[in-house]
Amino acid sequence: MKKSLHPDNYRPVVFEDLNNGFRFLTRSTVSAEETTKWEDGQEYPLVKVHITSASHPFFTGEERILDIEGRVDKFKARAAAGAAAKDKRAAAASKQAKRQAAKIEKAETKAEASKSK
């Protein structure tokens, strides 16, 4: 086995879970800029982490449902809404074009009627 492979600067460090405030003291080589006072009255380096075994659903046994609908369902709903909006715009444009064509036809028939008089 290689010598000097593992670090040798282990020291007590407090890790704090940002989800629930759970804190634990262990030995680590991680560097920390903040310090905190522990239950024994001493100051230790503080490392804030986003998730620990105290808040992770795998370890707590509770399953958190973050999203009722799945991502695919949401995508399909957005696509359907987009298609409906596109159809609505197309129908409005078609209606507008028919109105414009009717106006032009009316103007042409009026012009022909005035020429024949």
Image (cartoon, rainbow, N blue to C red):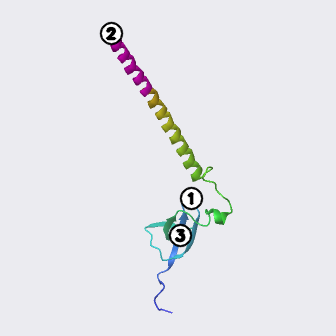
Which residue position is annotated with label 2?
A: 116
Q: Residues within 10 Å of mark 1 (few under 14, many from 20)?
A: few
- What amino acid is labelled 3 in the image? Val
**Residue 39 appears in the picture as rendered:** no
Image position of 44 (left or right of 113): right
Give 47 or 40, whichever is nearer the viewer. 47
Q: Which residue occupies the extreme right position in the image?
A: 61
Which residue position is annotated with label 1?
A: 19
Q: Secondary structure at mark 2?
A: helix
Relative to 34, residue 29 above or below: below
How many numbered discs, if any? 3
Q: Report the residue at 52% width, 75% height from top.
A: 12
Q: CA distance from mark 2 to mark 3?
A: 99 Å
Q: CA distance from mark 2 to mark 1?
A: 86 Å
**Residue 111 appears in the picture as rendered:** yes
Give 80 or 8, whichever is nearer the viewer. 80
- Residue 106 location (% of width, % of height): 39, 17
Q: Report the residue at 47% width, 34% height from top.
A: 90
- Residue 79 location (% of width, % of height): 53, 45
Image position of 116 (left or right of 66): left
Q: Secondary structure at mark 3?
A: strand
Which residue position is annotated with label 3?
A: 14
Mark 1 or 3, closer to the camera: 1
Q: Earlier in the sequence, mark 2 or mark 1?
A: 1
Asked whether disc 2 touches disc 3, contact meaning CB atoms under 8 Å apart, the reply is no
Q: Report the residue at 48% width, 38% height from top.
A: 86
Q: Which mark is residue 43?
A: none
Q: Residues within 10 Å of mark 3 (few under 14, many from 20)?
A: many
